[in-house]
């Protein structure tokens, strides 16, 4: 009886040591897989919004991802429906479609067809219109809009400004 | 302490310390294999040999490969392919073996399904085999990242995005897996680690488990006959080799096994020397570019069937169907409700089910390679639905099966 309880105590003591060790190791392993501080620090990009030509899709880069910038033409701005207008970003009086250029299905880069003013994703056949709204599945939603902050004619990607916060709160982007 | 005597020979010296004769008996000469089998029973050895080829060729590739986003592509396509003496041989062996190993795995799997080799005590053989299939899939995927070409990058992007789990939007998990917002240096190095160390270790451990699961139930035979291995092996050892239903693993079975391996190796090296292009996708000979998606992304042929189950649906349903396809094979021993462990040809409706499943997977594979448009989209959708229906129907079909 004496022996059994001693052995039981030793087993429990080892279990406690091993448990603390296991949890500690898992925390360290998880943290080691995290993105490095240098990766996170490089996550900001400033765009000068005055340089974009009207009606032409320009691809920028932010956090290694393509960013689609389309300065809308006067007809586009005039013809916007309510949902298209909700995604509209205005900087210095110009209207922009700005989004992460990755299909919201599994992350391929859709191609832009200027004649049809629409995007087609070659991977699984998803389609988007020029305002970034999805028009054909499988993508579950329109293009995501990156966190942005407007400062004069510049736009800082990666920082959250009031215009972006409003879009996020109303569920226009994730 | 054990008693040791002066050794009469090297063998005796080893025998006293390691019991090598006993080990040889347990592992080979008195490990019993049924006689009533055919060449499909050699696929296990073919797989073991192919794994050895992957290991050896991988060791030589590892001497010159550089897991860095700026150097990986050139270390593979320039250094290994042009500078290193016979570097091309190791790469072609590695690439062809990675593809062929899946062909043999599928043959091995469908042989098991056809002969009911996952029943009556053989459940763990099937489960450990399916775990091997999963780790081999992870090994193939991680290896595909390493040349850092366009297909590497975009397959890495698409497959890691699956972990956001659609409507759950677990983007943090995806970034954690990648170690960056997109596949970059951290991603390449950790997949390199997985490919050359962690996954091969897991595979070797699972191969050991897979062999161990065979020990007690033994290998199945062509008629699913329940053999009394104890009695039959005694008969064999007593000299009635012709009357016994079993034979030694070595050298009896091994001699035939290695004959099949020999034929296989001639076919394998024919592919390595003359038909290696099928294992090297031309799109992957463009260096990775995060700002340009290739016109048409598709996985290697052995993943096409499960990719095609993902593709025709909206994202959440697609992911559920994909998840279903990944785990459902594992549950086969429990979904098959029939007690009969006999070939599918003698099991009525199950025989039809077997061939429908095989044909459906071939159709899914073909459709997965084609662009997702028009009639192919429709055929793909029907085949994906058929896959799910077949598995849901399995317990009902087998429950009503007559006892053989």
Image (cartoon, coloured by chain):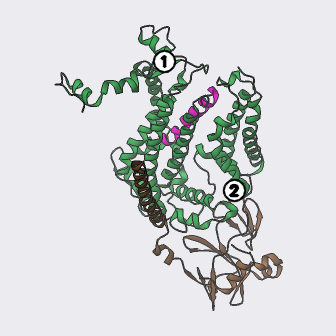
Nearer to me, B91 or B333: B333
Q: Is residue B127 found left or right of B236 in the rendered image?
A: right
- The circle drawn on residue B73 is none
Q: Chain of mark 2?
A: A
Of the 4 image quadrants, the one containing the C terminus of chain B is top right
Give the distance between the C-alpha atoms of the residues marked 2 and 1, in whole angstroms. 57 Å
- Chain A appears in which tint? brown
Q: Find disc 2 in the rendering and name its residue.
A: A124
Label 2 packing within 10 angstroms: few (<14), some (14-19), many (20+): many
The residue located at (77%, 34%) in the rendering is B396
Tell me where residue B27 appears, x and y as whole percent.
40, 27
Q: Secondary structure at mark 2?
A: loop
The residue located at (44%, 56%) in the rendering is A12
Q: Find disc 1 in the rendering and name its residue.
A: B230
| Camera-nearest label, 2 or 1 | 1
* Residue at the limit of the structure toward the front, as seen here: A1
Q: Quadrant of residue B344?
A: top right
């Amino acid at each position: 009886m004496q022996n059994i309880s001693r052995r039981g105590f030793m087993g429990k003591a080892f279990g406690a040591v091993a448990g603390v060790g296991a949890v500690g190791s898992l925390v360290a392993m998880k943290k080691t897989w995290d993105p490095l501080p240098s990766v996170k620090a490089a996550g900001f990009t400033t765009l000068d919004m005055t340089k974009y030509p009207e009606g032409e899709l320009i691809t920028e880069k932010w956090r290694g991802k393509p960013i689609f910038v389309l300065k809308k033409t006067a007809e586009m701005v005039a013809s916007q429906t309510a949902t298209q207008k909700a995604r509209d970003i205005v900087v210095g009086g110009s209207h922009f479609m700005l989004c992460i250029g990755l299909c919201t299905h599994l992350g391929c880069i859709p191609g832009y067809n200027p004649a049809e003013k629409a995007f087609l994703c070659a991977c699984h056949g998803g389609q988007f219109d020029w305002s970034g709204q999805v028009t054909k599945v499988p993508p579950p939603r329109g293009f995501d809009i990156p966190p942005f902050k407007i400062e004069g004619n510049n736009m800082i990607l990666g920082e959250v400004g009031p215009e972006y916060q409003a879009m996020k709160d109303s569920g226009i982007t994730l | 302490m054990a008693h040791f005597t002066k050794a009469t020979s090297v063998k005796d010296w080893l025998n006293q310390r390691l019991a090598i004769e006993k080990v040889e008996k347990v592992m080979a000469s008195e490990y019993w294999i049924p006689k009533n089998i055919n060449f499909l029973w050699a696929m296990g050895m073919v797989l073991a040999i192919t794994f050895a080829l992957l290991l050896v060729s991988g060791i030589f590739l590892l001497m010159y490969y550089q897991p860095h986003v700026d150097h990986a592509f050139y270390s593979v396509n320039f250094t290994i392919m042009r500078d290193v003496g016979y570097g091309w041989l190791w790469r072609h062996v590695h690439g062809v073996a990675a593809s062929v190993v899946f062909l043999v795995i599928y043959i091995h799997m469908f042989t098991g399904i056809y002969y009911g080799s996952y029943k009556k005590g053989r459940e763990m053989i099937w489960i450990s085999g399916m775990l091997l299939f999963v780790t081999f899939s992870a090994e193939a995927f991680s290896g595909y990242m390493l040349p850092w070409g366009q297909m590497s990058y975009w397959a890495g992007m698409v497959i890691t995005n699956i972990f956001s789990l659609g409507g759950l939007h677990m983007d943090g998990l995806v970034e954690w897996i990648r170690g960056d917002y997109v596949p970059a240096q951290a991603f390449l190095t950790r997949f390199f680690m997985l490919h050359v160390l962690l996954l091969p270790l897991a595979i070797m451990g699972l191969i050991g488990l897979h062999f161990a699961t065979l020990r007690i139930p033994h290998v199945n035979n062509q008629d699913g006959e329940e053999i009394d291995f104890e009695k039959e092996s005694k008969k064999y050892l007593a000299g009635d080799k012709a009357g016994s239903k079993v034979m030694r693993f070595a050298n009896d079975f091994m001699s035939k096994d290695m004959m099949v391996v020999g034929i296989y190796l001639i076919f394998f090296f024919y592919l390595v020397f003359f038909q290696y292009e099928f294992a090297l996708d031309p799109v992957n000979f463009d260096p990775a570019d995060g700002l340009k998606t290739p016109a048409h992304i598709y996985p290697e042929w052995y993943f096409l069937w499960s990719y095609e189950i993902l593709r025709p649906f909206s994202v959440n349903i697609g992911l559920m169907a994909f998840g279903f396809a990944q785990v459902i094979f594992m549950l086969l021993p429990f979904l098959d409700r029939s007690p009969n462990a006999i070939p599918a040809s003698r099991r009525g409706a199950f025989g039809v089910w077997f061939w429908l499943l095989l044909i459906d997977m071939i159709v899914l594979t073909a459709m997965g390679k084609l662009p997702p448009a028009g009639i192919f989209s429709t055929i793909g959708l029907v085949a994906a639905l058929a896959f799910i229906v077949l598995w849901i129907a399995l317990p009902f079909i087998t429950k009503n099966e007559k006892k053989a």
